[in-house]
Amino acid sequence: MDANGAVNCLTDNGTSETVSKTADSAVTSSSGWVHVSAVREGTSCKVFINSEDKTATAGTHTTMTANDLNLRLGSNTSGSGFFKGYMDEVKIYDYAITPKALLVDYNAGHAIPGSPVGSAKAWWKMDEGYGATIHNTGSSGSANDGTITGATWSLEGKYDRALDFDGTSDYITVATGEIINQDTVTIEAWIYPTSVTGAHDFTILAQNDNGAGYTTHNFGIAGSTGKLMYDNELPSDGVLSGNTVLTANQWQHVAVVRDADSVTFYVNGASDGNGTGEARTSAASIDNTLIGARYYSGAPQHQFAGKLDDVKVYTVALSASQVAQAFNRGKAMAFGSLSTDTAGLPLNSAKSAYCVPGDSSSCNPPVADYSFDEKQGTSLNDLSGNGHTGTITNEGSYGGTNPKWTNGNIGGALEFGNYGYVEFTDDELIAQDNITVEAWIYPGKVSGGSSNFPIYVQNKNDSQGVTNFSHLFAIDYTNGKLKYDNSPAGGSINSNTALSANAWYHVAITRNGNAVTFYLNGKSDGSGTGETRDIFTAETLIGAKYYWVMYEANVDQFIGKISHLTVYDYARTPGQIAWDYDRGNPSLWWKLDECQGLVANDSSKQGAYDGVITIGATGTTASEGSCSSEQSDEAWSIGSTGVTNAGIYFDGTDDYISLGTGPSIYAVSFWVKPASTTQSIVDLDGGTHTISVSGGTISAAGFSSPTVYVDGYPTTSLPDTNWHQITVVDTTPLGTSNITLGKINTSLFTGQIDEFKLFSYPMTATQVRQNVVNATAVFN
C-alpha cells in the first residue's frame, strides 16, 4: 500500500517496476479491518478489496524468476517501507485463485450463500418496518443503503417484513453510482408481483444514467410476456428473457446470473433459460442504482408492482447449486418457521409471527409494535408499519429527564422514573372498547406513595386541566396488582397477583366488549367488567399519565423498565397471549430427567412447582435408586430409558408423584409406557378431573368438552403398551390442586411416564402434533 492509500501489486525485475493498483484512498486509517488480495495471472495482476476487483491502474507484468531473497511480511525485501497496523490470515497460493474462491477466503472459509459473513456485496433484507431507509447488510456496508420513495412497509414478507410497491411511482434509490462495475454478477430477490404483464416492464433492480436513461444490469419482469428479463443499454439494447411466465400474487424466488457473457435465469432455484449477454460498457455517467424502477426518458419509470424482499447483489456468478441453496435461505437444509397455517405449512412473514400455529382465530397484526431495540435517540419506532412513532421526552419544569436506554430481558428497554415518558401525539391508538396491550416490565417499585405506575394510557388534556383517560393499564400503588381503568367513572379492575419489584414480567390486558382479562407471564390472572370508555382522549403515553395539570405528566409515573410493548385493536385469545409470551411453551413442565432423588423438578419458566416423588418399599421398586445403578428394584433404574433422556417407573403398588396446586389449565400432555392398557394415570384436582385408560380406551373424566389425542392424532384409543403420547385439550379452563401423577384415589399406575406438561391455553391440533415431534426429533 502506498502513501496515497492505494493498494499495489508490484513486480520488480531488477531493472524496472510494474504496478497495478487501486485508486488512491482505497484504504485509509479509518477503514477498519480490510481484506486485500492481489491475483496475478500471466502478465496481469488484479487488486481486490473485500473480494471486489478494485484495479484502477493495470500494468503489464514481466515474467517472475526464482531468486534467493527472503520472503518478508510488513516491509519490502530491502528493509524499508514498514507497515503500521494489524495483519491476520495471510495466505499465498501458487496459482491464480478464482473470484469465487477469493470470496470464500473473504468469508473466513464459509460457503458463499448462507455465510454468516457478508457474501453479497449488497443485501437489503427490508425488515426495518419503519422509516425511509433500507439498510445494506452486505459487504459494501452503509454506502449502499437505500432511500425509499413511496413504497410502504408490509408485515407480509417472504421472510419477516417486505416493501410494497404500487407499480406507478414507488422505488428505492441507492445513490452510489454502480454497485457492480463488471460483467460478472448475480442478482436475486424474493418477489410477490401483483401484475406480471402490462404496458411496461416491472423492474426489480437497475443501474442508471439518470439523464440519458441508460441502464446496466437491468433485471425485472418483461411486461409483454410476464417472464424474467435482463438487459444492458450500454452500448446496445439486446434483451434476454427467461422461459417461465411468473405467477401474480404469489411469492417466487428469482435470480439472474451473468458469468462473463453467459446469462442464466432462475425461478424458485431451478434454471429458467439462458443466453448470451451483450457487452456492458462501464459508464462514468451511471448515477445510481434503483430498486423497483429504472430511469427512462429522464425519470424513474417501469415501476415494480407488488412486494420485494431480500434483494441481493453478488460480485460473482453463483453456480446452479448455489442458487438452489440461496432459494433455501442459504442453507443445505432449513428447519423451523415463525408459525404455520391451519394445514401445518410453514409461515415466515412478520405477520405470521403473531399467529398461533394451526389456529383459525383472527390474528391480525398489532396496531402498534415497539421492540425498544433502538437503544439510542429520542424516537420509539413502530414496527407494525402503521407509523405510530413515539417521542421520548420528559416534564422539564419538574426537573425531569428522558427515560434511559438500557438492556431488556430480550433486546433493549427504556428505564423510567424521573418524570420521563414516551408520547404519541397522533390521537388515541385505539378508538374503541376492544383492545389488547402487552408488555415486558421490570418494575422498580410496585406499591406505596399516592399514585399508580402507568404502563400505557390514552389521555385528554385541555385548557381547563381536564385529564380524562381511557385504557389505563398500570400497576396499582395500593396493592401492587395490575390495574385497568377508564375515566370519568371510578370503577377500576385489578388482577389477582401482587407483583414484586425488581423482576421481569410479561403482562397483558385484553378487553372484549366489557369483558376484561389480565394475564401474567402468559397465564390468566383475573378478570372483571370494564366501565364505559372515555372517547374524548387525544394523546397516548407510555410510562406516565396526565393528572389534573394541563399538559403535564407530573404525578403518575412508572418506576422501572418497559420493553417490547404491543397494542392490538381486538382481544387476543388465551392461546395467543401464551404464544406472545414464550411461543406456547407449557406453563408447568416436569421432564423427569433427574435420574436420582425424590424431587421432580419443574423445568418451566416458573421453576417453582417441584414435585415430591414417593417410592414405597413394597412392590417391584423398593427405592428410587438412580439411572446408572442398573438395579431391577429401583424406580429410576427401571425407567432410565425415556422418550427424551430418562423417565421414571411406577410399580402400581405405592409409587406416585405429588405436584401440589398449579395454575388454571386448558391442556395436559405426557408420554406413557403402561404395563397394560387399563391404568389410572393422573389426578389433576383431588378426584374431579382425571385421566385414565380402560381396556385401551382413554377417559378424561370431569372435563367440560375434551379432545383426546394419541401421538398427535385425535383418538381415545391406546393401541398397545409401547411408548405413546397422550394429550387432552378442553375448551374451558380447570383449576388444578393436589395434582398426583401415577395415582387416582387408591388406584395406582404401573409403567413408565415421561415429559408431563400443563398448558394455560387450549392447544391447536397443530401445536399438539408439534409437541409430539419436539420430543421425538431431538438433535444433540
Image: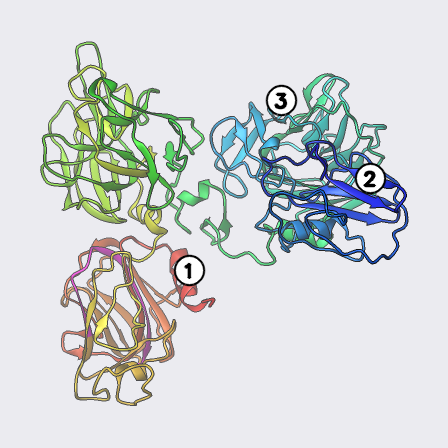
Q: Which residue is label 1 attached to?
A: 770
For residue 22, above or below residue 624: above
Residue type indicated by callout 1 = Gln
Magenta-drawn stretch, dominant element (helix, strand or loop): strand
Distance from disc 3 to disc 1, alpha carbons, whole Å, reads 44 Å
Mark sitting earlier along the chain (3/1): 3
The residue lying furthest to the front in this view is: 79
Q: Magenta part of the protein: which range?
A: 657-676
In the image, taking residue 648 as reference, residue 656 lies left or right, namely: left
Q: Which residue in the structure is indicated by mark 2? A: 19
Q: In the rendered image of this protein, does residue 297 appear above or below residue 217? A: above
The residue sitting at 73% across, 42% down in the picture is 48
Residue at image coords 14%, 74%: 745
On whether residue 670 falls in the magenta region, the answer is yes
Q: Quadrant of residue 61?
A: top right
Q: Position of residue 66 (x, y in %)?
A: 86, 57
User: The residue under label 2 is which amino acid type?
Assistant: Val
Q: Residues within 10 Å of mark 1 (few under 14, many from 20)?
A: some
Residue sitting farthest toward the top: 463
Residue, disc 3: 168
Disc on the earlier residue, 2 or 3: 2
Q: Residue at x 59, y 29 (%)?
A: 146
Tags 2 and 3 in contact by the CB under 8 Å rule?
Answer: no
- Residue 397 in percent (x, y) is at 22, 17
Q: Does the segment drawn in magenta span residue 278?
A: no
